[in-house]
Amino acid sequence: MYSDELKEELELFRQNVCRFVETEIEPHYVQWEKDEIIPRELWNRMGDQGLLAVDIPEEYGGIGANFLFSMVIMEETFRANFAGIGGSVAVHSDVVCPYILHHGTEEQKQRYLPNMVTGECVGAVAMTEPGAGSDLQGIRTTARRDGNDYLINGSKTFITNGQHCDVVAVVARTTMDVPGSRGITLFLVDADTPGFQRGRNLEKIGLHPSDTSELFFEDVRVPMSAILGELDRGFAILMNELQRERLMVSVTAVAAAEGMIEQTVAYVKERKAFGAPIATLQNTRFKMAEAATDARIHRSFIEECARLLMRGELDAATASMAKMSCTEMQGRVADTCLQLHGGYGYMKEYGISRAYVDARVQRIYAGTTEIMKELISRELLK
Ligand SMILES: Cc1cc2nc3c(=O)[nH]c(=O)nc-3n(C[C@H](O)[C@H](O)[C@H](O)COP(=O)(O)OP(=O)(O)OC[C@H]3O[C@@H](n4cnc5c(N)ncnc54)[C@H](O)[C@@H]3O)c2cc1C
């Protein structure tokens, strides 16, 4: 499928990522879970090691790698059960950076991308509001013209990297008297702009090291040059870029499932019941066979989707199928693997308990399973 040279490069890169995960993440992760946030310097360390926004072209400070390299970073953090870091990095590298690269002005690209590659600037995207999540068209945050500037007012919630972010891609309504998706614009707002305020770091049931926050905007004055893409055309940008975001969630779901299966294979070979390892029980063998098959089928699908994305051919329905099916599969695998751990699976000491809890949100963010079904059926039945 890929040339030998590319395979070799990917393998070397994978080894680098695994080394970083083992030395820079694993020893500290439990503490970061307790802190409910990672130290800000981790972003810089990832940048130093070339692990942020790897597909940004060299002219903007990146290495211009293809999407497969970005996939490797996500795969190895999720396979190793560090979703609380992978998720934050995905928002920065696989959501905000591509928005700026594909839709930013030359000035915006020069200003943000090199610093996002090094980790000096952390990105967040603020779509969701207390009253509008799935129904993004119902957002109430406004950006009203005031002379040559815009004044942004409103509040956002559930924003990944909300505590650490230096720049936020904010979705706001710019034209009030048009219905639905029209009249929505994206703005790049620097976190030190007066009137911008971070709310508390929200307490979640999982993904503890990933900071998730409310954000408040009170007369936040931004120049016209802060508009990302075209005025009133923000919804179209979001719809275009969501394919990559959904594929990346699918990739992480498959890698997390593979990681859980590896952990569980080791466990069931060790753990004895009725005088023999539980791996000898037919139920265990069949459940593991089903889980491994489930993961393998989905791996083929995400690899096909990655090829489509790189050719610019990944459509909304296919990306939604991947997002829905891979994350539902991750949930099934998490449940099976935890069950096979018995009571130990419910203990924090065992990684499967974290993998189980962290898996749950994958069916919710980046569009819920139900919204994915809407998108797929809309295309199917049009
Ligand atoms: C940990 C975490 C991180 C997040 N990070 C970000 C971020 O960085 N930036 C950001 O903008 N947002 C972020 N989100 C928000 C996330 O994208 C939303 O939570 C998600 O889109 C769902 O919106 P909601 O929570 O308002 O649920 P709702 O939209 O209120 O949905 C509630 C239920 O109703 C169902 N439902 C809604 N509409 C329909 C329909 N038409 N048909 C059938 N069922 C429907 C949903 O599927 C769901 O089951 C994050 C959320 C979490 C939990």
Image: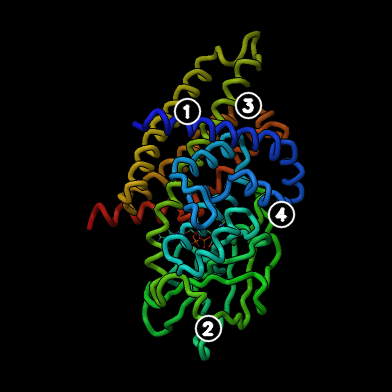
Instruction: Say few, some or many: other residues with alpha carbon within 10 Å of mark 4 (under 14 / 14 to 19 / 20 or more).
Output: some
Question: Mark 2 near mark 1, Cβ–Cβ under 8 Å?
Answer: no
Disc 4 marks a residue whose amino acid type is Arg
Q: Which residue is mark 1?
A: 291
Residue 59 coordinates in the image, percent (x, y):
49, 56
At label 3, the amino acid type is: His
* Residue occupying the far bottom of the picture: 147
Q: Nearer the viewer, residue 356 or 9?
A: 9
SS assignment at label 1 = helix
Farthest residue toward the left?
A: 382
Compared to 335, does 285 lie above or below?
A: above
Residue marked by disc 4: 40
Q: Do we see residue 294 in this rendering?
A: no
What's the CA distance linking mark 3 and mark 1? 14 Å
Please name which of the two marks, 4 or 1, marks the residue nearer to the observer: 4
How far apart in space, not on screen, are marks 4 and 2 (Cα)? 30 Å
Which residue shows up at 40% across the image and 68% down it?
235
Which marked residue is nearer to the observer: mark 3 or mark 1?
Answer: 1
The disc, 3 or 2, on the residue closer to the chain's N-terminal end is 2
Q: Kindly report the distance in space between the C-alpha atoms of the residues bearing marks 3 and 2.
A: 55 Å
How far apart in space, not on screen, are marks 4 and 3 (Cα)?
35 Å
Q: Earlier in the sequence, mark 4 or mark 3?
A: 4
Q: Position of residue 344 (x, y in %)?
A: 69, 28
Q: Amino acid at mark 2?
A: Tyr
Which residue is tagged 2?
Answer: 150
The earlier-in-sequence mark between 2 and 1 is 2
Q: State which tag comes first along the sequence, 4 or 1.
A: 4
Residue bearing the label numbered 3: 341
How many residues crowd mark 2 within 10 Å: few (<14), some (14–19), many (20+)? many
Mark 3 and 2 residues: CB-CB less than 8 Å, in contact? no
